[in-house]
Image (cartoon, grey):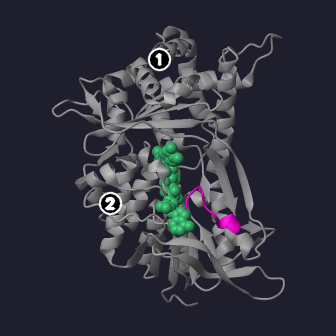
Amino acid sequence: MSNDPKNIIVIGGSVAGLGVGVTLSADGHRVTILEADSSPMPASHIEAFEKWERKGSPQVWHSHALLSRLHTLIKERAPGLIEQLLACGAEELSFQQMAGRMIKDPVFEPEDEEIVLIACRRITFEWVLRRYVLDTGLVEFQDGVSVTGLTTRKESGTDPPVVTGVRLRDPDGTESTLEGDLVVDATGRGSKLKRWLEEIGAQPFYETSEPCGISYTSRFYRLHDGVEPPMLEGPIVGEDLGYLKVGLFPGDDRVFSLTLAISPDDEVLRSVLHRPGFEAAAAAVPRVAEWVSPETSEPISKVYAMTNLRNTLRRFVVDGKPVAPGVVAIGDSAVHANPITGRGITFAWISAAMLADTLREIPDDLNALALSIDQQVEKNLLPWYELQTQQDRGAIQTERALLRGEDPFQMTRPDGTTDPQAFIRSMIRDGLVPAMRSDMVVLRRFMRLANLLDPPDDLMKDPDLLQRIMAVYNTRNERKPVNQGPSRAEMVKILQAVAT
Ligand SMILES: Cc1cc2nc3c(=O)[nH]c(=O)nc-3n(C[C@H](O)[C@H](O)[C@H](O)COP(=O)(O)OP(=O)(O)OC[C@H]3O[C@@H](n4cnc5c(N)ncnc54)[C@H](O)[C@@H]3O)c2cc1C
């Protein structure tokens, strides 16, 4: 086996491509990143927010949670990057701080040290990451270079084509090719890999894709100087009103962002995706209103919307054979899911680390490399993907019931039978959520799961946990109802008032 350095071509210079740059250059490989956006580095993360052109990655203008698993991977693979993020005003949000605010006299376990999120804007994260990768001097980053296809060699009549490099277009329009030992597609959710593989005669790869039932809208705000931010219990403020999902995310430099998400089917609420409706809806949700009030903060961006969001998983081994050895997909190009759970960047870094480790194990066999990566995707990413699609189907049902004017928490059907889905929804709202405010075991399990530190076992199938959640659920009538925000009918009136 040869562990000679390889020439790695990475298509796409966003967080996944840069993650591959970090992990593979650390192993001595020569990495060339080709990025289509002509987007020279701004001088600082502040300028990046003000004027970085990142058309190829429109989600940079949305709220992002950076999960604990990502924090751990960065500490392992990019020592120094955390300090550089903190120097730009990012913050580490530890479990100790959060649990201390949520639970009286919490008792901690050593493993709780692992639960640390990073509060940082997506644009700041990418700027610091690109700076870090460039400063290593080990990665070549070519700006404004678009890949237009793949180069290939055919081993024999029946074998799949082997990818040997890329066809590309320089900023001045010159077409050329670049050959390497391995091509990594990190071109995001709009990846053209399907077409590129068709063009070289590869078999179609496996793809599953379905709408995730959400339209997203975000805006950034800055806290006024000298003003203390309102109380934050967990890492974010999160409210699920059924018809509206609300997330408020602390970022770097006293900036926070607010995201409101609605069902794409909810025509009446679409005005939330634009500024007047967004502002009115935000002001109507009590835990958010205090953050966005003019006494506390000022908006520093427009309201950005993103629609047509999907859950998509692509796999490149079909009937036990790689469709095209020599090319690997990483980040959103391989898997992207409902952004509400904030897993995308962490998935990208899990895959970047997996690629580096696998290449160390299997340096000279592109077929075996592709097979091994596919097995690891099945083990490490597929269960999360399946959990997400299952939860999204449930959420879509809830939203549709609300649109029909039904109560999605009504457990007894008109024929007297029990609706199991309504029971699960009630257990989450009246059991799991309040239990996280009183029971360390429940809070710890939930936070470890939400931060991808533990595999996605079904919380509701663990007998001890279920008992703890049931105990809280059974006292639901003794608690005062929490005012999360207006009902859908009330919100419709609020939005109509703004429209007129
Ligand atoms: C609304 C929204 C909110 C999200 N919130 C979170 C969150 O809270 N936490 C989280 O972890 N994740 C979140 N995500 C997911 C996260 O943003 C993505 O997983 C992540 O940005 C994907 O990075 P990537 O590098 O794979 O792709 P992208 O960031 O999409 O980058 C792809 C890059 O490839 C370049 N490119 C494209 N085509 C070519 C070509 N032909 N040649 C050369 N370059 C090319 C593009 O210019 C771009 O720079 C969210 C996503 C959305 C949509």
Residue 192: say if magenta: yes
Amino acid type of the residue that numbered disc 2 sits on in the rendered structure? Val
Pick whichever, 225 or 76, lies toward us. 225
From this viewpoint, is residue 283 visible? Answer: yes
Q: Position of residue 45 (x, y in %)?
A: 28, 55
Residue 137 location, x and y as percent? 33, 78
Q: Is residue 195 left or right of residue 182?
A: right
Q: Position of residue 245 (x, y in %)?
A: 52, 29
**Residue stretch in magenta:** 187-195
Question: How far is disc 1 from disc 2 in space, using C-alphas?
Answer: 37 Å
- Residue 376, given in percent of the width and then of the height, sits at 63, 64
In the image, 118 versus 108, the foreground residue is 118
Local packing at callout 2 (Cα closer than 10 Å; few below 14, some 14-19, many 20+) is many
- Residue 485 is marked as 1
SS label for mark 1:
loop
> What's the residue at 62%, 33% (across, down)?
264
**Against 323, is 345 above or below?**
above
Residue position for label 2: 128
Disc 2 C-beta below 8 A from ligand 1: no
Q: Is residue 203 above or below residue 112?
A: below
Residue at the spot 52% in from the left edge and 26% down from the top edge: 271
Q: Pointer 1: residues within 10 angstroms few (<14), some, or many (20+)?
A: many
Establish whether ligand 1 lies closer than 8 Å to the Cβ of label 1: no
Question: In the shown orientation, is residue 164 left or right of residue 154?
Answer: left
Q: Is residue 298 left or right of residue 172?
A: left
